[in-house]
Structure formats: structure tokens, C-alpha cells
């Protein structure tokens, strides 16, 4: 605990200084958002390919899938493969992804603060989110979608995104949190990711944002902008194999006629 005291004092000092200096935005004791992105990218670039087993469960009004076990492979830049028995859908927003892809969907990103979150020192960032980047349909047709913002918590020890919240005006529609495990060669990968949704029935999730399925989500639910729906997705990862090499041909779909 004594070792944490200096860090706590520094973070408290940061918070006090920024509160006193709100009227003078020309100077900042926080790093630039670009430097945090660079650190996130460097950490992500240590991963070239991996395999993991995922236990996934989905509970939403649009789609319900009891716990399903899938085998998942990834290779840069964007090769993926899923094997499972029967139907399975995995949300892309809950998977390990390039921070560049995330930041490309954000504008006016700034560092808003620093704090201790669940025992970790974090930078807090915020940016304006592009409507098309969300896993919901019809966002461009929804008036409130012009006020989309995302708040992010970045662990500065491992340079991982451990939490994010997406707001439509002041209404929180998506919350994602992850617990990470450290591996050799300074690599951190998630052990568990939780996605929580609060969305209106006129904001239907899009299956294009799920690995493993292009099928439409169950229809028949009346679209009503006043009705709030809730849902959750939980992903649990195990049996990682990291940077052991995967040939590109492994990801090619087999011809069912053969």
C-alpha cells in the first residue's frame, strides 16, 4: 500500500490542477490523445496472430443465444475464422481489435482526466463517435445520433482499453469492460469481456457487426423510440495460443461441393 501512495498523490494533484486550470486550455499536464493512441498501437502490434477458445452468451430481446463455445483464430490484418457446432455469433466490438480502427471512428478526441479504476492507473479519453460505427441499424435516421460520444478508460501500465461507455446525448447505450491477463513478451489479452446495452427498439442491432453470421436478427419487435430495451453479451476467453504462426490458406472458406 505504501508503494501506491506516491501514485495516488500524483493523480490527486493532476485532478486538482486540471480543475483549477479549466479556464486556460492552452496548457495541459495531460498527454495528447495521439500519444496514448501510439502506446495502444505499439501494445497491439506485439500480436501477429492468435487462437483462443471463447465461451459466449447473448441475452437481448433481438437475439438470445445460450452459452456457446467457439474456437476463434485471428491473423493480421483482418483474417478471422470461427468453428463451432451450430449457430454462433460473436460481437466484433467485444473482440481484440486495432486501436486505430477505433480511433478512426472518433473525432475531436481529448484526454479528460486520470484516476484509479479497479486498482489500475488510467487515462480517461472522450471523443465524438460516428453513427455508422455502432452495431445498431438506422442510426443516421435517428435525430439523437448526432450527439454520440464515447468515453474510454486506458490502463497505462499495459496500454489496454479496459472500459468504454457510449452515450447518445446523456443516455448511455453501450458499456464494454474487459479483464486482461498478461502473457510473455509484454502481451496482454482479455480473459473476460462484458457488453451491456440500453437501446431503443428503433435501434436494431446489425448482424454485420457480429463474427460468424450474416443473418438478420429476429424481427417482429415494434420499433418505438420511447421503449428502452436492455441486453448483455459475455465473452470468456481461454486456451490462448499467441504468435505461433497461422498460414493464410487456413482462413479460406472450403468449397462445400468438394
Image (spheres, helix red, strand yellow):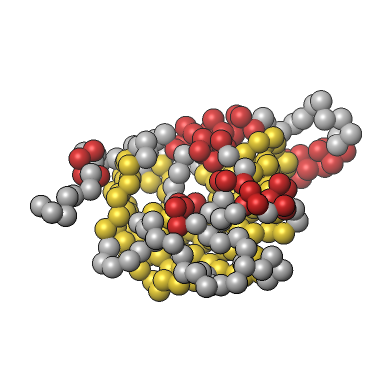
Give percent across and percent down for residue 31. 67, 31
Relative height, residue 232 to residue 4 (above, below): below
Q: Is residue 217 among what the camera can see?
A: yes
Give percent across and percent down for residue 238. 34, 59
Viewer-side residue, 145 vs 160:
145
- Considering every residue shown, the one lying at the far top of the view is 26
Relative height, residue 23 to residue 93 (above, below): above
Viewer-side residue, 193 vs 79:
79
Left or right, 80 with reference to 199: left
Relative height, residue 39 to residue 71 (above, below): above
Give percent across and percent down for residue 84. 27, 63
Residue at the spot 75% in from the left edge and 31% down from the top edge:
29
Left or right, 143 with reference to 234: right
Residue at the spot 53% in from the left edge and 54% down from the top edge:
135
Residue at the spot 56% in from the left edge and 68% down from the top edge:
231
Residue at the spot 35% in from the left edge and 68% down from the top edge:
68
Amino acid at each position: 500500500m505504501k508503494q501506491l501512495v506516491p501514485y495516488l498523490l500524483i493523480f490527486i494533484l493532476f485532478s486538482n490542477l486540471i480543475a483549477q486550470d479549466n479556464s486556460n486550455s492552452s496548457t495541459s499536464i495531460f498527454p495528447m490523445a495521439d500519444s496514448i493512441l501510439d502506446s495502444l498501437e505499439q501494445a497491439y502490434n506485439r500480436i501477429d496472430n492468435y487462437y483462443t477458445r471463447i465461451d459466449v452468451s447473448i441475452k437481448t430481446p433481438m437475439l438470445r443465444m445460450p452459452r456457446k463455445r467457439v474456437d476463434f483464430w485471428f491473423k493480421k490484418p483482418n483474417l478471422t475464422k470461427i468453428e463451432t457446432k451450430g449457430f454462433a455469433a460473436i460481437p466484433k466490438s467485444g473482440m481484440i481489435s486495432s486501436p486505430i480502427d477505433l480511433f478512426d471512428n472518433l473525432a475531436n478526441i481529448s484526454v479528460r482526466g486520470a484516476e484509479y479504476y479497479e486498482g489500475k492507473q488510467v487515462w480517461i479519453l472522450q471523443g465524438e463517435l460516428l453513427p455508422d460505427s455502432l452495431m445498431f441499424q438506422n442510426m443516421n435516421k435517428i435525430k439523437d445520433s448526432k450527439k454520440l460520444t464515447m468515453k474510454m478508460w486506458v490502463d497505462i501500465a499495459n496500454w489496454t482499453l479496459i472500459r468504454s461507455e457510449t452515450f447518445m446525448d446523456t443516455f448511455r447505450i453501450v458499456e464494454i469492460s474487459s479483464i486482461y491477463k498478461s502473457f510473455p513478451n509484454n502481451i496482454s489479452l482479455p480473459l473476460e469481456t462484458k457488453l451491456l446495452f440500453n437501446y431503443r427498439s428503433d435501434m436494431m442491432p446489425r448482424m454485420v457487426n457480429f463474427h460468424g453470421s450474416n443473418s438478420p436478427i429476429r424481427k417482429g419487435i415494434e420499433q418505438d423510440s420511447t421503449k428502452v430495451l436492455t441486453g448483455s453479451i459475455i465473452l470468456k476467453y481461454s486456451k490462448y495460443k499467441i504468435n505461433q504462426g497461422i498460414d493464410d490458406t487456413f482462413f479460406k472458406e472450403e468449397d462445400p461441393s468438394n
